[in-house]
Each structure stands twice: as C-alpha cells, then as structure tokens.
Image (cartoon, grey):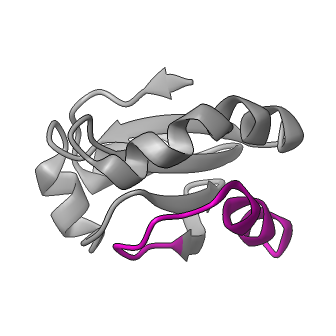
Amino acid sequence: MEKLAKMDKKALEEKLSTGKYVLFFTADWCPDCRFIKPAMPEIEAEFSQFEFILVDRDENIDLCQEMMIMGIPSFVVYEDGKEKARFVNKDRKTKKEVEDFLNNI
C-alpha cells in the first residue's frame, strides 16, 4: 500500500484524477487503526479494482481537516478525482464492515 506524501486536497484530487482509489486514514498511535491494519492486505486483494493509499493523519493533519476526517480509522473512496463514498467516524471498524462498505459503492 502506497503511503501518501504530505499534500493539500487540491493536490490530492490531481493525484487521484484518473482511476479508483481507497484512502485509508490512520495513525500509528491509534488502537482501532492497529486493529484493522492486519486485515488490510486481504481487503486490498479482495478489492483489487481499487488502489489503496495509506494516509497518516498526523503527517496530513491539514488535509484531514480540509476533508472533515474527524475520526480514524476512516476510508474515503475516490473515482477519477471525485469523492464517491466515505466511511468516516471514530469507531473501530471490522474487516466485514470495511468489505460491506466497499461492496456497496
């Protein structure tokens, strides 16, 4: 999984201008993020139509504020530069919840 460099929302939308992406917002100190991280390789394999990008909340705090990402772990789907769906809250997420979210896009 690629790790996103520090950037603002405009630069992010340019980076994601073509293709399907899942942004995975996380932080090393977050216990709920550590809970879902081991499942991410399986989720990535199952949803290979998407490119997954890890966004470190602490490194991209301004981007998170611009995007209204107030809780982690969170997932935002982009297609051709536009946000398509989001699974954003402060709750722990299970592998099944993330799969259900991605299946319903």
Q: Does the magenta stretch include residue 91?
A: yes
Q: Quadrant of the N terminus?
A: top right
Q: Does the magenta stretch include residue 40?
A: no
Q: Nearer the viewer, residue 14 or 64?
A: 64
Q: Is residue 105 left or right of residue 16?
A: right
Q: Quadrant of the C terminus?
A: bottom right
Q: Nearer the viewer, residue 99 or 78?
A: 99
Above-or-below relation of 64 to 23: below
Q: Is residue 65 left or right of residue 104?
A: left
What residue appears at the point 54 percent right and 72 percent down from the top-left corner?
87
Residue 49: x percent and y percent? 84, 42
Residue 69: x percent and y percent? 30, 68
Q: In this view, does 53 lie to the left or right of 26?
A: right
In the image, the segment drawn in magenta is 87-105
What residue appears at the point 60 percent right and 58 percent down from the top-left corner?
78
What residue appears at the point 27 percent right and 48 percent down from the top-left corner?
30
Q: In which quarter of the image is residue 70?
A: bottom left
What residue appears at the point 41 percent right and 57 percent down from the top-left corner?
73
Residue 27: x percent and y percent? 27, 41
Above-or-below relation of 97 to 33: below
